[in-house]
Image (spheres, rainbow, N blue to C red):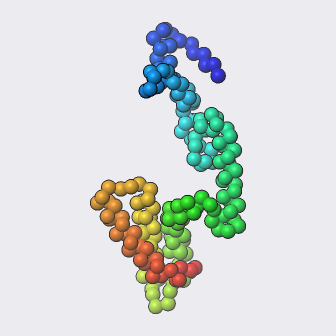
Amino acid sequence: MLVVWEAESKRHVRYLLVRVFKMDDAGGKMKFDYYKIMPEWTTKYSPFDMGYNYAHYFRAPHRFVHDLYNRVKWFIQRGQRGYADCDVWSLDFYLCRWMPAALKVLETNNIGHPIGMTRRGWNTRLRIMREGFEAAHEIGDKMPDRPEFNRLERKMNKGLKMFSKHFLSLWD
């Protein structure tokens, strides 16, 4: 692809070339930087939350077809068996992504609670479980520093212990 610029001066041409090309560390050769010439929206956004931005897919359209195929395949797998191959790659992260929302629905529906427990006590336990899963997600996603990690780990352990204790009571 040939790109033509209207340059105001030789200095302006040099500036444009420096922005588009970057020096290779090994041989000192100029290396083309594809993403510098792409419009900003192509590097900022991604189609259908597919993982790569538009600029990458313009450069490698076969990758878009491959990713789209995988998304459809995983959608069908979730419909047939309840989970997809990509969910099993990191099952803990997958569960931590949707479990807090499911526990929040149980908390807000207020349809039922275990025998021998008040509605307020059950909602408190559901909140502790939800916060435990959120803490586990944050640990896996953000890699916090040591004091924050310890705080999140305590919250996660408390929530998961509560989850295991009341596992058979998670119904609506």
Q: Find the residue positioned furthest to the front.
A: 27
Whole-percent x, y for residue 169 in the image? 52, 83
Name the residue located 63 percent from the left edge and 62 percent from the top edge: 84
Q: Please tell me which residue lies in front, 40 or 109.
A: 40
Name the residue located 54 percent from the left edge and 31 percent from the top edge: 35
Task: Give above or below for 41 relative to 161.
Answer: above
Mark count: 0
Whole-percent x, y for residue 45 in the image? 57, 41
Task: Give above or below for 59 relative to 165.
Answer: above
Q: Is residue 127 left or right of residue 145?
A: right
Q: Please tell me which residue lies in front, 37 or 116.
A: 37
Task: Give above or below for 136 relative to 36.
Answer: below
Q: Find the residue positioned furthest to the left.
A: 147
Whole-percent x, y for residue 171 in the image? 56, 80
Q: Would you say residue 31 is visible in this rendering?
A: yes
Name the residue located 53 percent from the left edge and 79 percent from the top edge: 170
Position of the C terminus by quadrant: bottom right
Q: Would you say residue 123 is visible in this rendering?
A: no
Q: Is residue 62 left or right of residue 5?
A: right
Whole-percent x, y for residue 36 in the image? 52, 28
Q: Is residue 64 left or right of residue 151?
A: right
Residue 65 falls in which quadrant of the image? top right
Task: Give above or below for 1 relative to 45.
Answer: above
Position of the N terminus by quadrant: top right
Q: Find the residue positioned furthest to the bottom.
A: 116
